[in-house]
Image: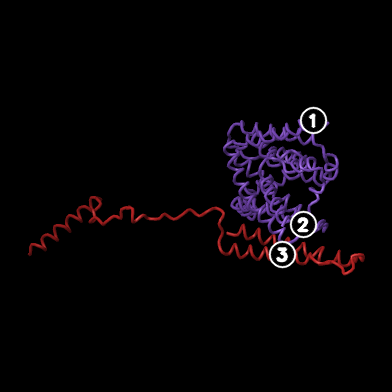
Amino acid sequence: MSKQRKKDERKAAQRAAATRDNVRVVKPATPVATRTARTVVKEPKNTRPLTFGKDTYVWMGIGFALVLLGLLLMSGGRGEDPNVFDPEVIYSFRKLTLAPIVMLSGLGVVIYAILKK
Amino acid sequence: MIELLKALVLGIVQGLTEFLPVSSSGHLELAKWIMQDDSLAAESMLMTVTLHAATALATIVVFRKDILEILGDLLKFKWNDGTKFAALIIVSMVPAAIVGVLFDDVLDALFDRQIVLVAVMLILTGLLLFLADRAQRTEKAVDWKDAVIIGLAQAVAILPGISRSGATISTSVLLGIDREKSARFSFLMVVPLILGKMAKDLMDGDFGGAVSLPELSIGFVAAFFTGIAACVWMIKLVKKAELKWFAYYCFAVAIIVLAWKGVMS
């Protein structure tokens, strides 16, 4: 039996004994990265509480677009003659019912976007 | 350009006064009295709705985790913490809703230009804030009786000179409720009221006063971001018991107004 083989067998017996006695076998040391001026490990920044994901901004955009649409629906109604009052234009379904509903829906979408996980 | 600047100022003032305990309505009455100008109150309804939407959204952004928890609990259709909190909010809204629906016009007419009343109410706001700072720190949460009393404080805060946030937070803290929970309850209890009032105003369709889209946008953005900053700051101040500085401010304004009124008459 060669010298090398005897050495290997002795090491294996030591390892087996250590495992049996519940002793942790010490592994060869691995190089540990140290913090030097050049190799500063950047820690991940904490996520700011007020930042949102991309989806949220998309939904917010849709919500605000609906609010703008509501405002556009609400606009207009100016007659050519300022002395003529046309209640059918001023108090139309579009301006008094549809526009507020569209605006409130837009606001609802913005709230959904904020609360969306 | 002047109109855009006015929208910016309106947005900043709305964002600050919605959350900081200094009474926006009291300051509006004071401004009307000093400038002898009623048109200050007659801003476009659409601008008012926009600014309120901005501060309501600011509140939702700051408390979105709490709101999500409450909504999650509500959707379980069981009696749990979130359901109880939502029920407490509804209970606290009742007094202000009754006063708002039944007596809003009467109160507006009764207290218009009553500058001495505004000064006295500012002193009352200051006293409440001062006392709130001295209240003992506890861990207590809002219960049913507290919700009714805080709701009454919110109803009283319709008077010009009484700050809504100041009255409700101070009342909560004086009732022995934890400071952070008090601020959270105060700011969350007003969101349904604001959204409801906005929906009512929009559906009523009385859009007095013309206002352009750039003005609305600037007002909204200013109120939204100022509102978030003011809300976060106010929560910190309540936790640190640092409301006394607003109390001193209220006392100072009230004394100046009373002295000025005395000299003028």
User: Disc 2 designates what residue?
Assistant: B46
Instruction: Please identify the quadrant where the N terminus of chain A is shown.
Output: bottom left
The amino acid on which the numbered mark 1 sits, given as a three-letter code, is Val
Please identify, in this view, whether the residue under mark 1 or under mark 2 is nearer the observer: 1
Which residue corresponds to the image point at 79% horizontal and 65% vertical from the top-left? Answer: A75
User: Disc 1 designates what residue?
Assistant: B263
Label 1, label 3: how many angstroms apart (C-alpha)? 50 Å
User: Disc 3 designates what residue?
Assistant: A68
**Can you say whether B154 is above or below A110 in the image?**
above
Name the spot of residue B13 as percent of width and height, x first: 69, 47
Label 3, label 2: how many angstroms apart (C-alpha)? 13 Å
Sequence-wise, which precedes: disc 1 or disc 2? 2
Q: Residues within 10 Å of mark 1 (few under 14, many from 20)?
A: few
User: SS class of the residue under badge 2?
Assistant: helix
User: SS class of the residue under badge 3?
Assistant: helix
Which residue corresponds to the image point at 71% horizontal and 54% vertical from the top-left? Answer: B7
Q: Chain of mark 1?
A: B
Q: Which chain appears red?
A: A
Image check: A51 left or right of B30? left
Q: Residue B259 falls in which quadrant of the image?
A: top right
Q: Residue A80 falls in which quadrant of the image?
A: bottom right
Marks 1 and 2: CB-CB under 8 Å?
A: no
The amino acid on which the numbered mark 3 sits, given as a three-letter code, is Leu
Outermost residue on the bottom side: it is A80
